[in-house]
Amino acid sequence: MSEYLGDERRDVSWHVEKKLSISHMISTIVLAGAVIGVYRDMDTRQVRVEAAVHQLEKESDKLDKRHNSRMDRIRVEQKEAVQKVDKSLNRINEKLDRLIEREIDHNGHLR
């Protein structure tokens, strides 16, 4: 059987019509509006996130300064405590030396 080649033959391939329907124009405008809206929303979110990050950085800097000042105070207190212990040990050593010298002087030798 041969293929029909008359006017009634339907073309199966893709084609583009030159007509433009109102529904296509409206859907294109709505789609463009949606894309613009999403872009604005993303831009607004980005600005909010940047502001939040900036605020967190400021708070972090404040906390760092507060922490550093506390650590400085602790270091000073620790240094003072070590100096007190050193002074006490030196006094104990001096007293022991005097006691040992007293014992040696009295007896001539250490008991």
Image (spheres, rainbow, N blue to C red):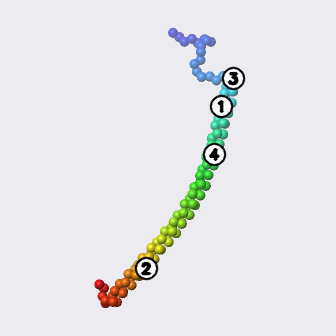
Query: Callout 1, which amino acid?
Result: Leu
Nearest to N terminus: mark 4 or mark 2: 4
Residue beneath label 2, please?
91
Q: CA distance from mark 4 to mark 2?
A: 64 Å
Answer whether labels 1 and 4 touch (C-beta < 8 Å). no
Residue 48: mark in rendering: 4
Residue beneath label 3, please?
21
Answer whether labels 4 and 3 touch (C-beta < 8 Å). no
Compared to residue 35, the image places residue 100 above or below, namely below
Q: CA distance from mark 3 to mark 1?
A: 16 Å
**At 31% from the left edge and 90% from the top edge, which residue is drawn?**
108
Q: Nearer the viewer, mark 2 or mark 3?
A: 2
Residue beneath label 1, please?
31
Q: Is residue 53 left or right of residue 74?
A: right
Query: Callout 4, which amino acid?
Result: Arg
Nearest to N terminus: mark 2 or mark 3: 3
How busy is the neighbourhood of tag 2: few (under 14 within 10 Å), some, or many (20 plus)?
few
Answer whether labels 3 and 1 touch (C-beta < 8 Å). no
Nearest to N terminus: mark 1 or mark 4: 1
**At 65% from the left edge and 42% from the top edge, which residue is drawn?**
44
Position in image of residue 90 (x %, y %): 43, 78
Q: Nearer the viewer, mark 1 or mark 4?
A: 4
